[in-house]
């Protein structure tokens, strides 16, 4: 129905028409049917299945950390669901630079435990011509005062990448860009000392650029990015 609810009718000996009730504020966004069972995906990214379960076709597995189901299909005695790539999330507050700009972290591509490239994390509005590091930790978020800004990643098992430098900005402005391909770094292709957690599928990683600003303003600190390592 147009309000996101779902109704079913017909042969119901094994319960394929017994649509589960929805939690408050949640709607159905996709539906399919098998031989004697039904499948639906909800707006909270949960997948539910009901009806004939003789082969376990209604036992929806929990997706790996950071993943969600984006597509469903029902077969005669089986159910299919496609996982979407985990979506990194930006959080925390960046430190204002000496140019009064706000450096911003971002990404392109997807984190992967098997790929050798294709997941670039970058920082814009950094001090032109200066170097920086990507701090990263497997132990979650933080919001601790640090060098006039905030350390947004846990200090437990805090690691750093190799140094990366801006080559596009115009000194002394703050139009620089720092970037690193974390898939390549995790595979050991960029040097440094990458840790095994960067190659563990489902592992949460929190990261933040630290860099050089002016002597008076101290360190450059971006906001932070949280991502999950994909397959």
Image (cartoon, rainbow, N blue to C red):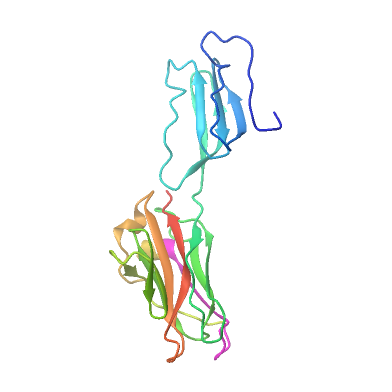
Which of the 4 image quarters holds residue 33? top right
Residue at the far right: name it: 2
- Which quadrant is home to the N terminus? top right
Pick the front one: 178 or 144:
144
Q: Is 67 on the left or on the right of 5, as rendered?
A: left
Q: Is 84 on the left or on the right of 204, as rendered?
A: right
Q: In this view, does 109 lie above or below 202?
A: below
Q: Position of residue 41 (x, y in %)?
A: 56, 33
Q: Where is residue 185 in the image (x, y as percent from the top left)?
A: 39, 66
Residue at the spot 42% in from the left edge and 86% down from the top edge? 218
Q: Is residue 181 magenta?
A: yes
Residue at the spot 38% in from the left edge and 54% down from the top edge? 204
Q: Position of residue 18 (x, y in %)?
A: 55, 17
Pick the front one: 46 or 109:
46
Q: Is residue 150 above or below residue 97?
A: above
Residue at the spot 40% in from the left edge and 61% down from the top edge? 206
Residue at the spot 46% in from the left edge and 23% down from the top edge? 58
Q: Where is residue 194 in the image (x, y as percent from the top left)?
A: 32, 65
Magenta-colored span: 169-183
Residue at the far front: name it: 24
**Count of picture labels:** 0
Q: Is residue 117 above or below residue 164?
A: above
Which of the 4 image quarters holds residue 108? bottom right
Q: Is residue 17 magenta?
A: no
């Amino acid at each position: 129905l147009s309000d996101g609810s779902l109704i079913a009718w017909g042969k119901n000996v094994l319960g394929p028409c017994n649509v589960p009730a929805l939690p408050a504020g949640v709607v159905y966004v996709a539906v399919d049917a098998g031989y004697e069972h039904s499948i639906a995906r909800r707006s909270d990214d949960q997948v539910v299945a009901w009806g004939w379960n003789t082969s376990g076709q209604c036992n929806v597995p929990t997706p790996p950390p950071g993943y969600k189901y984006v597509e469903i299909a029902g077969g005669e005695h089986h159910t299919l669901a496609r996982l979407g790539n985990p979506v990194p999330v930006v959080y925390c507050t960046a430190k204002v630079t000496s140019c009064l700009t706000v450096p911003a972290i971002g990404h392109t591509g997807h984190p992967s435990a098997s790929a050798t490239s294709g997941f670039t994390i970058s920082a814009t509005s950094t001090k032109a011509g200066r170097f920086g590091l990507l701090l990263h930790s497997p132990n979650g978020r933080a919001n601790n005062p640090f060098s006039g800004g905030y350390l947004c990643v846990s200090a437990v098992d805090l690691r750093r990448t190799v140094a990366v430098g801006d080559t596009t900005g115009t000194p002394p402005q703050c139009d620089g860009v720092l970037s690193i391909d974390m898939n390549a770094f995790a595979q050991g292709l960029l040097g440094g000392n990458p840790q095994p957690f960067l190659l563990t599928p489902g592992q949460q990683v929190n990261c933040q650029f630290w860099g050089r600003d002016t002597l008076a303003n101290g360190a450059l600190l971006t906001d932070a990015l949280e991502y999950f390592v994909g397959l």
